Amino acid sequence: MDKVEAAAEDGHREFRVEELARAAGITTRTLRFYRERKLLQPPRREGRIAWYGEGHLARLRMIAELLERGHTLGGIAELIGAGESGRDVAELIGLEAAIVAPWSDETPVHLDWDELKAALGDQLTEENTAESVAQGFVTIEENGVTHVSRRLMDATTALVAEGVPLSVVLEASRQTQEHVTAIAEIFTSLVRDHLLGALAADTPLPPGEAARLTEQVLRIRPLARTVTDAQFALAMDRRVHAEYDEVLRQRMEHREDD
């Protein structure tokens, strides 16, 4: 049994440069380029042979993942430089994933022109269509439209079916979008200013700090929705009661006038 086979059996496989490049799905030229950019740890040398380990393969896979996320090689070098170990870099990647993970799980829906006409009738005007596009919810296609959210599209057609003009629904949508954008800014500012301030500092994060921040971000994300849902429900209670009281007051006044 040679050294490579023994190392593999011990769970510490080593690779020659060609083997490592093949395992990582890159060329040997790219691998050497990463070494020159100091993106890869120096190999273990045995005479003139360079031996790479599982840690090198993990680093190459991490680099590939970061490139897919849109990072530049310079940015990756900074990330690697910010961490004292592969674990630190992996924790930074995990923190990034937690921060930028999608909040929306909306399902897009496509409707052809006949379906839209059946759902919206004479409300399907050029002006209403243009407003829908301007709000960023609808994309016009040759054979119809695609709405970014099936739920919002269903709500829109249901309101129109109840007799609310589409132009009024779209105006309510525009105002709602402005308010929810302001709410989103409140929560992003809260997280940025009170939790993630260390990321903006020009100093490396302490060991384990990225992992701690990741856990904190994951705990806080659902709290933002909880607060927003509760505040909206309470606000609706206040407004509905106030509006109903006003309707009753006006009815009483009309009766007294009669």
Image (cartoon, grey):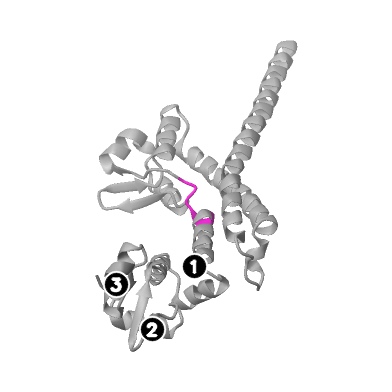
Measured from the top left, where is residue 233 in percent x and y?
A: 62, 31
Can you identify the residue that label 3 sits on? Answer: 4
57 sits left or right of 225 in the view: left
The segment highlighted magenta reads: 99-104
As drawn, 66 above or below 247: below
The mark closer to the camera, 1 or 2, is 2
Dot 3 or dot 2: first in sequence order is 3
Can you identify the residue that label 1 sits on? Answer: 86
Q: Say if mark 3 contacts mark 1, CB within 8 Å.
A: no
Q: Quadrant of the N terminus?
A: bottom left
Q: Amino acid at mark 3?
A: Val
Q: How many angstroms separate mark 3 from mark 1 (CA)?
A: 23 Å
> Which secondary structure lies at badge 3?
helix
For the question of whether residue 25 can be seen, the reply is no
> Which secondary structure lies at badge 2?
strand
Can you identify the residue that label 2 sits on? Answer: 45
Q: Amino acid at mark 1?
A: Gly
For the question of whether residue 54 can be seen, the reply is yes
Foreground: 139 or 70?
70
Disc marking residue 131: none
Measured from the top left, where is residue 196 in percent x and y?
A: 64, 59
128 sits left or right of 142 in the view: right
Dot 1 or dot 2: first in sequence order is 2
Measured from the top left, where is residue 99 in percent x and y?
A: 54, 56
* Residue 246, picture quadrant: top right
Foreground: 20 or 231?
20
* Residue 123, picture quadrant: top left
Measured from the top left, where is residue 200 in percent x and y?
A: 64, 67
Q: Amino acid at mark 2?
A: Arg
> Which secondary structure lies at badge 1?
helix
